[in-house]
Amino acid sequence: MIAPLIELAARRTTLADAALKTDETTSLRFAGGRVVSAAVSRSQGVNLRVVAEGRMGFAGTTDDDAPALLESALTSARQGEAASVALPRPAAKPPAVQTHGARAATANLAELTALGTLVRDRLAAEHADLGILVERSIGSVRVANTRGLDAGYDVTCVTLAVEAARIRNGRRVVIGGRLAGVDLPSLVELEGLIARLRQRLAWAERDAEVPAGRHLVGFLPSALPLLLLPVEQALLGKAVLQNSSPLGRRKGARVYSELFSLRDNPLLDGRPGSRPVDDEGVPSRVVSLIQAGQVEGFLYDLETATRVGVSPTGHGRRSTFAKPQPAWTNVVVEPGASSFEELLGVVGDGLLVEGTRGAPVGNAIGGTFAQPAAVAWRVSGGEVLGLAQEVTVAGNAHDLLGRVAAVGRDAMWIGCRSAPTLVVEGVSVF
């Protein structure tokens, strides 16, 4: 559909571009040791942007009616904003990156079921209530515009999510783990996930009280979004454009600990957020955002880059029915040098947070939070004593990232984030 759509649009617009995305997802859910549901869903969406008579319009559809989609976009343009975008020309050679796994694409239902069965069997001795999700997606992305660009790539993604639950003193304790990548997980990855779940279940055999106050707190990779999300939002070009980013005027300044570095990397083979071009056809590239605590850059799509007066970074993302927005691909926090034992020594008498409960509470981009810990561990004398009772952690993410005491070398991929354990000072615990 995308080629005839662009041909039609070229006759009636100053410029136009479109993104076509397809997806087929197979989902298997295990409970009580067996498959309880299996489903296949399919979707297709086209997003069209046009500039006509100096104004931009947007429209989307899930069907194949190109003329109707163009008419909707032209109608939108009549009431749209003044045009502020220049479309890219075809790249000589888009960067190479693996976004598609042959084994994942051809895996049948029996092979996907075997993934969940393997995890179930390896954790059988833990006597936990297991919930397992195995999900395989196959799709494609194609971007074209009226300047001759026509780029596309195939996508696969396999997700394995596990929850192991036990009842402790009337409280249901859930320990979770997740793997995601463009291909089926390796045996090494599976064994690593199983080992982490076993360790956490062993820690949960004991309870431990945590005194209220300010503590050194270790945020495990699964808990780091609490600190990272405000920074990620503040580094988007849209926030800079709207003057809502606390980092917008601080490029070149050191605002965080020298131990904290952050980048976006869409060119990592085999990771869920990887891609050769963004949803506007701009070639992907690695962008350093925070280096040794210093703000080095921001992420832009075409429109925000034009309005701010900088070059786009290749971070435009489109959904079917919305205008493009700048967005992250693969978030990478640079690991440090500390072993896990050394991290526990730095925590000393404090807390290790596995994850928090619910949506962030407080000022998201401003960084202020007060969040109940879903699972946390009491640390004393550099050793894990046991499962912390109900606690809430509070503070400001931007301030706390300025007080990083140690960074682990235990970087772990969770979805589209790679992060190590961070130990920070001055977290309020109550």
Image: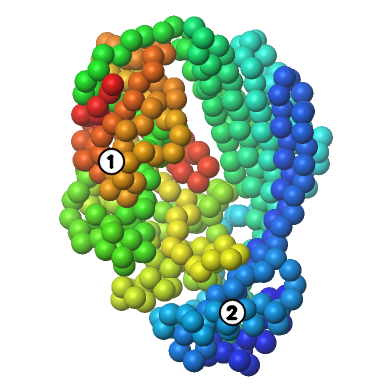
Taking 309 as reference, is 414 above or below it?
above
Question: Which image quarter: residue 307?
Answer: bottom left
Residue sitting at x 28%, y 18%: 350
Taking 382 as reference, is 70 above or below it?
below
Question: Which image quarter: residue 225?
Answer: top left
**Is residue 278 at all visible to an observer of this figure?**
no
Q: Position of residue 322 (x, y in %)?
A: 54, 66
Q: Nearer the viewer, residue 307 or 180?
A: 307
Quadrant location of the C terminus in the rendered image: top left
Q: Position of residue 347 (x, y in %)?
A: 27, 21
Residue bearing mark 2:
73
Quadrant location of the N terminus in the rendered image: bottom right
Of the two numbered discs 2 and 1 on the same chain, state the one appearing first in sequence: 2
Residue sitting at x 50%, y 13%: 171
Q: What's the amino acid at mark 2?
A: Ala
Question: Pointer 2: residues within 10 angstroms few (<14), some, or many (20+)?
Answer: many
Q: CA distance from mark 2 to mark 1?
A: 39 Å
Q: Residue furthest front?
A: 79
Question: Pointer 1: residues within 10 angstroms few (<14), some, or many (20+)?
Answer: many
Q: What's the amino acid at mark 1?
A: Thr
